[in-house]
């Protein structure tokens, strides 16, 4: 049974899935899970409410609570009640959270660079990195447009 060539879209989708696994592997090296890393990344912009974090991360509020519980226990995130609304909680990165995020960023960058170099050599590494940066900005813009509507 022969292998059919993949369309560019299917190849990109499968590449994204494999890349996500490499990110997961890199984060294990610095003792973070992908959900913890995503939450730390979100909070780096100045904190967030738990409800907003759940919406942005596309998870349920109880899932965010579980992630936050682990990060609070590790002194990476603090919780503060929102004045005037005891049900709302503001989440903020600590110095330890900033350091953990930096370690996660470095581990992921190293993993991605290793994969890029193995794939097509150093010439493609910069363009691959640029493409991922483009996706990051596109997703942030999409979040912002949804928040405004």
Image (tube, rainbow, N blue to C red):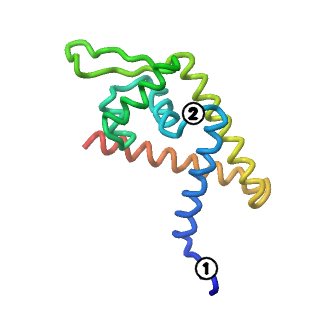
Q: Is residue 93 visible?
A: no
Looking at the image, the residue that sits furthest to the left is 84
Q: Observer-nearest residue: 138 or 89?
A: 89
- Marks 1 and 2, Cα distance to the nearest angstrom? 36 Å
Compared to 131, does 81 lie above or below? Answer: above
Q: Observer-nearest residue: 38 or 24?
A: 24
Q: In percent of the image, x 79 and y 53: which residue is there?
A: 122
Residue bearing the label numbered 1: 5
Location of residue 108 (image quadrant): top right
Task: Pick the quarter of the image with the C terminus.
Answer: top left
Location of residue 119 (image quadrant): bottom right
Residue 20, x across and y down, in percent: 56, 51
Q: In percent of the image, x 60 and y 57: which residue is there?
A: 18
Residue 14, x across and y down, in percent: 56, 63
Compared to 82, does 68 lie above or below? Answer: below
Q: Is residue 77 visible?
A: yes
Whichever of labels 1 and 2 marks the residue nearer the N terminus, that label is 1
Location of residue 107 (image quadrant): top right
At numbered mark 1, what does the secondary structure look like: helix, strand or loop? loop
Number of the label disc, if any, that sits on residue 32: 2
Residue 32, x across and y down, in percent: 57, 33
């Amino acid at each position: 049974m022969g292998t059919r060539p993949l369309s560019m879209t299917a190849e990109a989708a499968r590449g994204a899935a494999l890349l996500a696994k490499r990110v997961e592997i890199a984060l294990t090296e610095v003792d973070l899970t992908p959900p913890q890393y995503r939450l730390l990344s979100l909070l780096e912009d100045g904190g967030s409410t738990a409800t907003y974090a759940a919406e942005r991360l596309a998870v349920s509020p109880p899932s965010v609570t579980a992630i936050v519980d682990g990060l609070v226990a590790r002194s990476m995130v603090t919780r503060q009640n929102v004045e005037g609304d005891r049900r709302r909680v503001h989440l903020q990165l600590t110095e330890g959270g900033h350091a953990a995020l930096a370690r996660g960023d470095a581990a992921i960058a190293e993993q991605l660079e290793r994969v890029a170099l193995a794939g097509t050599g150093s010439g493609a590494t910069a363009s691959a990195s640029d493409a991922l940066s483009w996706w990051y900005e596109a997703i942030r813009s999409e979040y912002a447009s949804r928040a405004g509507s």
